[in-house]
Amino acid sequence: MAKMRAVQVAKAGGPLELVEKEIPQPAAGYVRVKVHACGICHSDSLTVEGHWPGIDYPRVPGHEVAGVVDAMGAGVLGWKAGDRVGIGWYGGSCGYCDRCRRGDFVACLINPQVSGISFDGGYAEYIVVPKEALALIPDEISFVDAGPLMCAGVTTFNSLRNSGARAGDLLAVHGIGGLGHLAVQYASRMGFHTVAIARGEDKAALAKKLGAHEYIDSTARNPAEALAKMGGAKVILTTVTSGKAMGEVLGGLGVDGKLLMVGASMEPIAVTSLQLIGGRKSVAGWPSGSSIDSQDTMRFSALTGVRPMIQEMPLERAAEGYKLMMDNKARFRVVLTMNEGA
Ligand SMILES: NC(=O)c1ccc[n+]([C@@H]2O[C@H](COP(=O)([O-])OP(=O)(O)OC[C@H]3O[C@@H](n4cnc5c(N)ncnc54)[C@H](OP(=O)(O)O)[C@@H]3O)[C@@H](O)[C@H]2O)c1
Ligand SMILES: [Zn+2]
Protein backbone atom coordinates (compact mmCIF):
# COMPACT_ATOMS: atom_id res chain seq x y z
CA MET A 1 0.00 0.00 0.00
CA ALA A 2 1.31 3.46 -0.90
CA LYS A 3 2.08 5.69 2.07
CA MET A 4 1.66 9.38 2.81
CA ARG A 5 2.88 11.80 5.45
CA ALA A 6 0.38 13.17 7.95
CA VAL A 7 0.47 15.04 11.25
CA GLN A 8 -1.83 13.61 13.91
CA VAL A 9 -2.57 13.64 17.63
CA ALA A 10 -2.58 10.18 19.23
CA LYS A 11 -4.81 11.24 22.13
CA ALA A 12 -6.55 14.31 23.53
CA GLY A 13 -3.91 16.76 24.73
CA GLY A 14 -1.17 14.81 22.96
CA PRO A 15 1.50 16.44 20.75
CA LEU A 16 1.15 16.90 17.00
CA GLU A 17 3.33 14.15 15.49
CA LEU A 18 4.51 13.52 11.93
CA VAL A 19 3.61 9.94 10.94
CA GLU A 20 3.39 7.72 7.87
CA LYS A 21 -0.09 6.42 7.06
CA GLU A 22 -1.65 4.49 4.22
CA ILE A 23 -3.09 6.70 1.49
CA PRO A 24 -6.86 6.38 2.12
CA GLN A 25 -9.23 4.98 -0.51
CA PRO A 26 -12.52 6.78 -1.27
CA ALA A 27 -15.70 4.68 -0.73
CA ALA A 28 -18.94 5.35 -2.66
CA GLY A 29 -19.92 9.02 -2.32
CA TYR A 30 -16.43 10.04 -1.17
CA VAL A 31 -13.62 11.89 -2.91
CA ARG A 32 -9.87 11.75 -2.33
CA VAL A 33 -8.12 15.10 -2.51
CA LYS A 34 -4.38 15.57 -2.94
CA VAL A 35 -3.74 18.36 -0.42
CA HIS A 36 -1.59 21.35 -1.39
CA ALA A 37 -2.27 23.61 1.59
CA CYS A 38 -4.03 23.59 4.95
CA GLY A 39 -4.50 26.57 7.27
CA ILE A 40 -4.12 26.21 11.03
CA CYS A 41 -7.36 27.44 12.63
CA HIS A 42 -7.84 28.09 16.34
CA SER A 43 -10.66 25.51 16.24
CA ASP A 44 -8.03 22.83 15.54
CA SER A 45 -7.43 23.11 19.29
CA LEU A 46 -10.75 21.25 19.75
CA THR A 47 -9.11 18.20 18.16
CA VAL A 48 -5.65 18.70 19.68
CA GLU A 49 -6.87 19.42 23.23
CA GLY A 50 -9.87 17.06 23.00
CA HIS A 51 -12.55 19.65 23.81
CA TRP A 52 -14.94 18.20 21.20
CA PRO A 53 -16.84 15.15 22.51
CA GLY A 54 -16.44 11.70 20.98
CA ILE A 55 -13.32 12.16 18.81
CA ASP A 56 -11.91 8.82 17.70
CA TYR A 57 -8.10 9.17 18.16
CA PRO A 58 -5.57 9.12 16.58
CA ARG A 59 -6.96 12.01 14.57
CA VAL A 60 -5.43 14.27 11.89
CA PRO A 61 -6.70 17.87 12.43
CA GLY A 62 -7.26 20.46 9.70
CA HIS A 63 -10.35 22.00 8.10
CA GLU A 64 -8.85 24.77 5.93
CA VAL A 65 -7.89 22.46 3.11
CA ALA A 66 -7.07 23.25 -0.53
CA GLY A 67 -5.96 20.77 -3.17
CA VAL A 68 -7.01 18.83 -6.26
CA VAL A 69 -9.47 15.97 -6.77
CA ASP A 70 -7.36 12.85 -7.02
CA ALA A 71 -9.75 9.85 -6.98
CA MET A 72 -13.49 9.30 -6.59
CA GLY A 73 -15.70 6.54 -5.20
CA ALA A 74 -18.85 5.41 -7.03
CA GLY A 75 -21.73 7.86 -7.36
CA VAL A 76 -19.75 11.09 -7.34
CA LEU A 77 -21.20 13.26 -10.09
CA GLY A 78 -20.03 16.66 -11.29
CA TRP A 79 -16.39 16.41 -10.19
CA LYS A 80 -13.33 15.19 -12.08
CA ALA A 81 -9.69 14.43 -11.30
CA GLY A 82 -7.66 17.66 -11.26
CA ASP A 83 -10.50 19.95 -10.12
CA ARG A 84 -9.17 22.58 -7.67
CA VAL A 85 -11.19 22.19 -4.48
CA GLY A 86 -11.39 23.35 -0.89
CA ILE A 87 -12.77 21.61 2.20
CA GLY A 88 -13.83 23.50 5.33
CA TRP A 89 -15.34 22.77 8.75
CA TYR A 90 -18.55 21.54 7.10
CA GLY A 91 -17.86 17.94 6.10
CA GLY A 92 -21.31 16.78 5.02
CA SER A 93 -24.63 16.03 6.72
CA CYS A 94 -27.32 13.33 6.84
CA GLY A 95 -29.42 14.75 4.01
CA TYR A 96 -32.79 13.71 5.50
CA CYS A 97 -33.37 15.48 8.85
CA ASP A 98 -35.76 18.47 9.00
CA ARG A 99 -32.89 20.94 8.68
CA CYS A 100 -31.29 19.21 5.69
CA ARG A 101 -34.68 18.98 3.95
CA ARG A 102 -34.92 22.77 4.36
CA GLY A 103 -31.50 23.07 2.71
CA ASP A 104 -29.95 24.21 6.02
CA PHE A 105 -27.22 21.56 5.88
CA VAL A 106 -24.86 23.20 8.37
CA ALA A 107 -27.52 22.87 11.10
CA CYS A 108 -28.00 19.14 10.32
CA LEU A 109 -29.53 17.63 13.45
CA ILE A 110 -28.71 13.98 12.86
CA ASN A 111 -25.19 13.61 11.55
CA PRO A 112 -23.15 16.75 11.03
CA GLN A 113 -19.69 15.75 9.81
CA VAL A 114 -16.75 17.95 10.73
CA SER A 115 -13.43 17.80 8.87
CA GLY A 116 -10.51 17.01 11.18
CA ILE A 117 -12.96 15.88 13.91
CA SER A 118 -15.42 13.29 12.47
CA PHE A 119 -12.82 12.14 9.93
CA ASP A 120 -9.11 12.83 9.34
CA GLY A 121 -8.43 16.40 8.20
CA GLY A 122 -5.96 18.30 6.05
CA TYR A 123 -2.66 18.13 7.99
CA ALA A 124 -1.80 15.36 5.48
CA GLU A 125 -0.80 14.76 1.88
CA TYR A 126 -4.21 13.20 1.09
CA ILE A 127 -7.70 13.51 2.60
CA VAL A 128 -10.88 11.56 1.85
CA VAL A 129 -14.12 13.54 2.28
CA PRO A 130 -17.86 13.24 1.52
CA LYS A 131 -18.56 14.76 -1.90
CA GLU A 132 -20.89 17.35 -0.28
CA ALA A 133 -17.87 18.92 1.46
CA LEU A 134 -16.18 20.08 -1.78
CA ALA A 135 -16.06 23.73 -2.83
CA LEU A 136 -14.67 24.82 -6.20
CA ILE A 137 -11.70 27.19 -5.99
CA PRO A 138 -11.75 29.99 -8.61
CA ASP A 139 -8.67 30.26 -10.86
CA GLU A 140 -7.73 33.64 -9.34
CA ILE A 141 -7.17 32.14 -5.87
CA SER A 142 -4.00 30.18 -5.06
CA PHE A 143 -4.07 27.03 -2.90
CA VAL A 144 -2.32 28.75 0.02
CA ASP A 145 -4.85 31.61 -0.04
CA ALA A 146 -7.85 29.29 -0.54
CA GLY A 147 -7.03 27.25 2.61
CA PRO A 148 -7.82 29.99 5.18
CA LEU A 149 -10.87 31.10 3.18
CA MET A 150 -12.39 27.66 3.83
CA CYS A 151 -12.94 28.41 7.53
CA ALA A 152 -11.72 31.83 8.68
CA GLY A 153 -13.05 33.26 5.39
CA VAL A 154 -16.43 31.58 5.11
CA THR A 155 -17.21 32.02 8.81
CA THR A 156 -16.69 35.78 8.73
CA PHE A 157 -18.07 36.40 5.21
CA ASN A 158 -21.18 34.31 5.84
CA SER A 159 -21.89 35.69 9.32
CA LEU A 160 -21.48 39.26 8.07
CA ARG A 161 -23.70 38.83 5.03
CA ASN A 162 -26.44 37.30 7.22
CA SER A 163 -25.97 39.70 10.15
CA GLY A 164 -28.77 42.11 9.24
CA ALA A 165 -26.35 45.07 9.05
CA ARG A 166 -26.71 47.24 5.94
CA ALA A 167 -24.23 49.30 3.96
CA GLY A 168 -23.21 52.37 5.92
CA ASP A 169 -24.00 50.83 9.34
CA LEU A 170 -21.38 50.97 12.08
CA LEU A 171 -19.94 47.47 12.35
CA ALA A 172 -17.16 46.41 14.71
CA VAL A 173 -14.82 43.46 14.32
CA HIS A 174 -13.53 42.35 17.72
CA GLY A 175 -10.18 40.50 17.71
CA ILE A 176 -7.76 40.74 14.80
CA GLY A 177 -6.44 37.22 14.35
CA GLY A 178 -7.04 34.61 11.63
CA LEU A 179 -10.78 35.30 11.47
CA GLY A 180 -10.68 38.98 12.42
CA HIS A 181 -8.20 40.11 9.74
CA LEU A 182 -10.48 38.64 7.06
CA ALA A 183 -13.63 39.99 8.74
CA VAL A 184 -12.20 43.55 8.54
CA GLN A 185 -11.57 43.11 4.81
CA TYR A 186 -15.05 41.68 4.13
CA ALA A 187 -16.83 44.26 6.29
CA SER A 188 -15.19 47.20 4.54
CA ARG A 189 -15.76 45.67 1.06
CA MET A 190 -19.43 45.11 1.97
CA GLY A 191 -19.80 48.82 2.68
CA PHE A 192 -19.97 48.89 6.46
CA HIS A 193 -18.40 51.68 8.51
CA THR A 194 -15.81 49.28 9.87
CA VAL A 195 -14.23 49.53 13.32
CA ALA A 196 -11.46 47.11 14.30
CA ILE A 197 -10.96 46.35 18.01
CA ALA A 198 -7.81 44.57 19.21
CA ARG A 199 -5.38 44.61 22.10
CA GLY A 200 -2.40 46.89 21.57
CA GLU A 201 -1.34 49.61 19.16
CA ASP A 202 0.78 47.28 17.02
CA LYS A 203 -2.23 46.06 15.00
CA ALA A 204 -3.57 49.57 14.28
CA ALA A 205 -1.68 50.17 11.04
CA LEU A 206 -2.40 46.65 9.76
CA ALA A 207 -6.10 46.96 10.54
CA LYS A 208 -6.27 50.25 8.60
CA LYS A 209 -4.39 48.66 5.71
CA LEU A 210 -6.93 45.82 5.68
CA GLY A 211 -9.73 48.37 5.32
CA ALA A 212 -10.76 49.40 8.85
CA HIS A 213 -11.99 53.00 9.04
CA GLU A 214 -11.34 53.22 12.79
CA TYR A 215 -9.19 51.32 15.25
CA ILE A 216 -9.78 50.86 18.99
CA ASP A 217 -6.92 49.61 21.14
CA SER A 218 -8.88 47.81 23.88
CA THR A 219 -5.91 48.01 26.28
CA ALA A 220 -5.81 51.81 26.07
CA ARG A 221 -9.53 52.66 25.82
CA ASN A 222 -12.74 51.02 27.03
CA PRO A 223 -13.97 49.54 23.70
CA ALA A 224 -17.66 49.67 24.67
CA GLU A 225 -17.45 53.38 25.57
CA ALA A 226 -15.47 54.17 22.42
CA LEU A 227 -18.10 52.46 20.22
CA ALA A 228 -20.96 54.11 22.10
CA LYS A 229 -19.32 57.51 21.45
CA MET A 230 -19.37 56.69 17.72
CA GLY A 231 -23.15 56.14 17.96
CA GLY A 232 -23.20 52.44 18.86
CA ALA A 233 -22.63 49.49 16.56
CA LYS A 234 -25.35 47.70 14.59
CA VAL A 235 -23.27 44.55 14.83
CA ILE A 236 -20.19 43.61 16.80
CA LEU A 237 -18.69 40.52 15.20
CA THR A 238 -16.59 39.04 17.97
CA THR A 239 -13.85 36.62 16.93
CA VAL A 240 -11.99 36.46 20.24
CA THR A 241 -11.41 33.31 22.29
CA SER A 242 -12.32 34.93 25.64
CA GLY A 243 -15.92 35.06 26.95
CA LYS A 244 -14.89 37.77 29.41
CA ALA A 245 -13.61 39.98 26.56
CA MET A 246 -16.85 39.40 24.61
CA GLY A 247 -18.88 40.67 27.57
CA GLU A 248 -16.73 43.79 27.76
CA VAL A 249 -17.74 45.05 24.28
CA LEU A 250 -21.48 44.47 24.68
CA GLY A 251 -22.07 48.04 25.90
CA GLY A 252 -20.89 49.28 22.50
CA LEU A 253 -24.08 48.15 20.75
CA GLY A 254 -26.51 50.75 19.44
CA VAL A 255 -30.31 50.43 19.15
CA ASP A 256 -31.25 47.04 17.61
CA GLY A 257 -27.57 46.10 17.87
CA LYS A 258 -26.39 42.52 17.82
CA LEU A 259 -23.34 40.94 19.42
CA LEU A 260 -22.58 38.22 16.88
CA MET A 261 -20.23 35.59 18.25
CA VAL A 262 -18.06 33.46 16.01
CA GLY A 263 -15.20 33.14 18.49
CA ALA A 264 -15.57 29.97 20.54
CA SER A 265 -15.08 30.17 24.30
CA MET A 266 -15.83 27.89 27.24
CA GLU A 267 -16.13 30.96 29.51
CA PRO A 268 -19.61 32.35 30.22
CA ILE A 269 -20.40 35.86 28.96
CA ALA A 270 -21.62 38.38 31.53
CA VAL A 271 -24.80 40.04 30.28
CA THR A 272 -27.82 41.40 32.15
CA SER A 273 -31.30 41.58 30.63
CA LEU A 274 -31.27 45.33 31.31
CA GLN A 275 -28.32 45.70 28.94
CA LEU A 276 -30.47 44.22 26.16
CA ILE A 277 -34.10 45.25 26.81
CA GLY A 278 -33.98 49.01 26.33
CA GLY A 279 -32.24 49.10 22.99
CA ARG A 280 -33.81 45.80 21.70
CA LYS A 281 -30.30 44.34 21.60
CA SER A 282 -29.40 40.71 21.08
CA VAL A 283 -26.61 38.21 21.48
CA ALA A 284 -26.26 35.48 18.84
CA GLY A 285 -23.83 32.92 17.43
CA TRP A 286 -22.91 31.85 13.91
CA PRO A 287 -21.39 28.59 12.62
CA SER A 288 -19.19 28.64 9.50
CA GLY A 289 -21.18 27.69 6.37
CA SER A 290 -21.84 25.01 3.76
CA SER A 291 -19.57 24.20 0.82
CA ILE A 292 -21.68 26.52 -1.35
CA ASP A 293 -21.17 29.31 1.20
CA SER A 294 -17.42 28.63 0.82
CA GLN A 295 -17.69 28.96 -2.96
CA ASP A 296 -19.54 32.26 -2.48
CA THR A 297 -16.77 33.40 -0.11
CA MET A 298 -14.03 32.59 -2.61
CA ARG A 299 -15.90 34.22 -5.50
CA PHE A 300 -16.45 37.39 -3.45
CA SER A 301 -12.76 37.34 -2.46
CA ALA A 302 -11.70 36.96 -6.11
CA LEU A 303 -13.98 39.84 -7.07
CA THR A 304 -12.94 42.27 -4.34
CA GLY A 305 -9.29 41.36 -3.75
CA VAL A 306 -9.76 39.93 -0.24
CA ARG A 307 -6.87 37.60 0.63
CA PRO A 308 -5.58 36.16 3.90
CA MET A 309 -2.21 37.35 5.22
CA ILE A 310 -0.30 34.10 5.60
CA GLN A 311 2.89 32.51 6.88
CA GLU A 312 3.67 29.35 4.91
CA MET A 313 5.32 26.37 6.61
CA PRO A 314 5.97 22.83 5.37
CA LEU A 315 3.71 20.09 6.80
CA GLU A 316 6.43 18.72 9.10
CA ARG A 317 6.47 22.04 11.01
CA ALA A 318 2.77 21.75 11.96
CA ALA A 319 3.47 21.67 15.72
CA GLU A 320 5.52 24.89 15.46
CA GLY A 321 2.82 26.60 13.38
CA TYR A 322 0.11 25.50 15.80
CA LYS A 323 2.07 26.94 18.76
CA LEU A 324 2.58 30.23 16.91
CA MET A 325 -1.20 30.48 16.45
CA MET A 326 -2.02 29.49 20.06
CA ASP A 327 0.51 32.07 21.34
CA ASN A 328 -1.34 34.75 19.29
CA LYS A 329 1.84 35.35 17.26
CA ALA A 330 0.66 34.24 13.78
CA ARG A 331 0.29 37.18 11.36
CA PHE A 332 -2.35 36.22 10.64
CA ARG A 333 -2.72 32.63 9.45
CA VAL A 334 -0.14 29.85 9.36
CA VAL A 335 -0.66 27.70 6.25
CA LEU A 336 0.94 24.25 5.94
CA THR A 337 2.11 23.26 2.47
CA MET A 338 2.54 19.79 0.97
CA ASN A 339 2.69 18.16 -2.49
CA GLU A 340 4.30 21.36 -3.78
CA GLY A 341 5.01 21.23 -7.48
CA ALA A 342 3.06 17.96 -7.69
N1 LIG B 1 -18.03 30.05 14.59
C1 LIG B 1 -17.26 29.36 13.78
O1 LIG B 1 -17.75 28.69 12.87
C2 LIG B 1 -15.77 29.41 13.93
C3 LIG B 1 -14.94 29.18 12.84
C4 LIG B 1 -13.56 29.32 12.98
C5 LIG B 1 -13.02 29.65 14.21
N2 LIG B 1 -13.85 29.83 15.27
C6 LIG B 1 -13.34 30.26 16.57
O2 LIG B 1 -13.04 31.65 16.45
C7 LIG B 1 -11.99 32.01 17.34
C8 LIG B 1 -10.89 32.73 16.60
O3 LIG B 1 -10.23 31.83 15.73
P1 LIG B 1 -8.91 32.31 14.95
O4 LIG B 1 -8.48 31.16 14.14
O5 LIG B 1 -9.14 33.64 14.37
O6 LIG B 1 -7.91 32.45 16.21
P2 LIG B 1 -6.59 33.33 16.35
O7 LIG B 1 -5.97 33.62 15.05
O8 LIG B 1 -5.80 32.64 17.41
O9 LIG B 1 -7.15 34.73 16.94
C9 LIG B 1 -7.70 34.76 18.22
C10 LIG B 1 -8.10 36.16 18.61
O10 LIG B 1 -8.57 36.09 19.95
C11 LIG B 1 -8.14 37.23 20.63
N3 LIG B 1 -7.83 36.83 22.02
C12 LIG B 1 -7.14 35.76 22.44
N4 LIG B 1 -7.09 35.75 23.79
C13 LIG B 1 -7.78 36.84 24.21
C14 LIG B 1 -8.07 37.41 25.48
N5 LIG B 1 -7.68 36.83 26.61
N6 LIG B 1 -8.79 38.56 25.51
C15 LIG B 1 -9.19 39.16 24.39
N7 LIG B 1 -8.94 38.67 23.16
C16 LIG B 1 -8.25 37.54 23.08
C17 LIG B 1 -6.94 37.82 19.92
O11 LIG B 1 -7.29 39.18 19.88
P3 LIG B 1 -6.28 40.42 19.66
O12 LIG B 1 -6.38 40.72 18.20
O13 LIG B 1 -6.84 41.48 20.51
O14 LIG B 1 -4.91 39.95 20.07
C18 LIG B 1 -6.97 37.15 18.54
O15 LIG B 1 -7.29 38.08 17.54
C19 LIG B 1 -11.56 30.70 18.00
O16 LIG B 1 -12.24 30.59 19.23
C20 LIG B 1 -12.03 29.63 17.03
O17 LIG B 1 -12.23 28.39 17.67
C21 LIG B 1 -15.20 29.72 15.15
ZN1 LIG C 1 -11.76 26.84 11.61
Image (spheres, grey):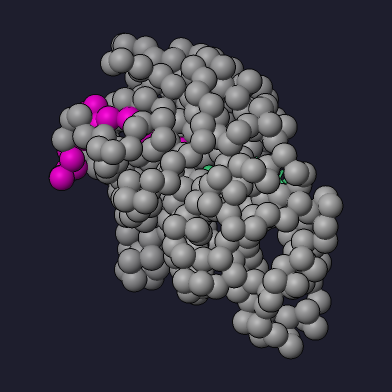
Q: Going by the image, does 157 lie left or right of 11?
A: left
| Residue at image point 70% right, 71% down | 230
Q: Is residue 78 magenta?
A: yes
Q: Going by the image, does 177 lie left or right of 75?
A: right
Between 150 and 116, which is closer to the camera in this rendering? 150
Where residue 197 appears, as percent x and y from the top left, is: 69, 54
Q: Give the vertical position of 257 relative to 201 (above or below).
A: below
Observer able to see residue 1: yes
Q: Give the vertical position of 340 relative to 151 (above or below).
A: above
Q: Is residue 318 magenta?
A: no
Q: Give the vertical position of 12 relative to 244 (above or below).
A: above
| Residue at image point 44% right, 51% down | 154
| Residue at image point 16% right, 35% down | 80
**Quadrant position of residue 56:** top right
**Quadrant position of residue 193:** bottom right
Quarter of the picture containing the C terminus is: top left
Between 336 and 47, which is closer to the camera in this rendering? 336
Quarter of the picture containing the N terminus is: top left
Where residue 69 appears, as percent x and y from the top left, is: 25, 31
| Residue at image point 38% right, 65% down | 104
**So how many labels did they put on this image?**
0
Where residue 287 appears, as percent x and y from the top left, is: 52, 57
Q: Going by the image, does 52 lie left or right of 223?
A: left
Q: Give the vertical position of 146 relative to 164 (above or below).
A: above
Where residue 283 appears, as percent x and y from the top left, is: 66, 71
Which range of residues does the magenta coloring cover? Answer: 64-79
**Quadrant position of residue 334:** top right
